[in-house]
Amino acid sequence: MNVRLWGTRGSLPTPGADHASYGGNTSCVAVIAGDARHLTVIDAGTGIRGLGEHLPHDLRRVDILLSHLHLDHIIGLGFFSALNWPGLEVHIWGPSSSVLDLHTRLSRYLSPPLFPVRLRDLPCRLELHEVASTRFEVPGLEVTAAFVSHPGATLGYRLDDGFGTVTYLSDHEPALGALVFPQSPEWTSGYDLAAGADLLIHDAQYDDQEYPDHVGWGHSSLSHALEMARLAAVGHLVAFHHDPGHDDRVLDRIYADAPSTPSLMVTPAREGAGFLVGR
């Protein structure tokens, strides 16, 4: 699998020179498993607009896996050029809800007065899929989805191409309610998705001093992300969803002593970074 980060920022885009090293676009990860004509995208933050400028001309299908529908994870959707390709097969997968279907929830954003174009008017061949804790397939990948700890219906994803495994747990607070973290695996949100993954992309929005003031907000400290990675015995942790208040200097300080070891590599997410997984 080829994995590329197109948006690494959490909560709010942060343009400007002070955020250029790690990136200011909100969450978006592109995954290609073998055939570049089939593209899988995880989340549709502002980073998806840049991804849309680099699509192959012979693209056949796009699958967009939405972790949840908070604005920073869907705000780029209407600016993704693939949605305006006549006849292109596009699938959007998102968390199911007991209240409203996925189309209705997405249409709250993709409709006037917030956006000028409605979902029904897009020229691509669009299909929406409601996802609970389940497994499904997209071209080249088996996807496992499960609900995780974050306010509102939120999914984590595990992608397997038969050669390697990538887990995506952005917007995740596995330490919520735990007096000591980590606890046993069966009581840890996201553990089954992350267990043994080659690459874990995990929320690390706060440093240890900030987290106590944000308990219950649905995000992790770097220390919690590290403990999650160790508990799940992953090979490589990519610390993701940087706080909008953390400029490059702050992130350089936070990650200066990030403890990579032979059993666990630790990398802070940087916009544009790529990873080859499983080959």
Image: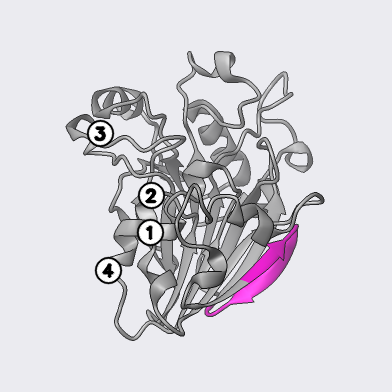
Which residue, as the protein is rendered here, is positioned at the far front? 113
Q: Which element carries disc 1, helix, strand or loop?
A: helix
Q: Quadrant of residue 106?
A: bottom right
Is disc 2 in contact with disc 1, using a CB cutoff of under 8 Å?
A: yes
Q: Residues within 10 Å of mark 2 (few under 14, many from 20)?
A: many
Q: Residues within 10 Å of mark 4 (few under 14, many from 20)?
A: few
Q: Nearer the viewer, residue 51 or 149?
A: 51
Residue 247 on image: x %, y % = 28, 27
Residue at the spot of label 1: 79
Q: Is residue 110 visible?
A: yes
Amino acid type shown at disc 1: Phe
Q: Of the residues under marks 2 and 4, which one precedes in the sequence? A: 2
Is disc 3 in contact with disc 4, using a CB cutoff of under 8 Å?
A: no
Residue segment shown in magenta: 128-140
Q: Main SS of the magenta segment?
A: strand
Measured in 3D between alpha carbons, the distance from the residue under mark 2 to the one under mark 3, in whole angstroms, is 15 Å
> Looking at the image, is 15 positioned above or below residue 216?
below
Q: Which element carries disc 2, helix, strand or loop?
A: loop
Residue 171 on image: x %, y % = 56, 39
Is disc 1 in contact with disc 4, using a CB cutoff of under 8 Å?
A: no
Q: Residue at the location (36% across, 52% down)? A: 47
- Circle nearer the viewer, 2 or 3: 2
- Circle nearer the viewer, 2 or 4: 2
Disc assigned to residue 19: 3
Q: Nearer the viewer, residue 200 or 278?
A: 200
Q: Nearer the viewer, residue 27 or 122?
A: 122
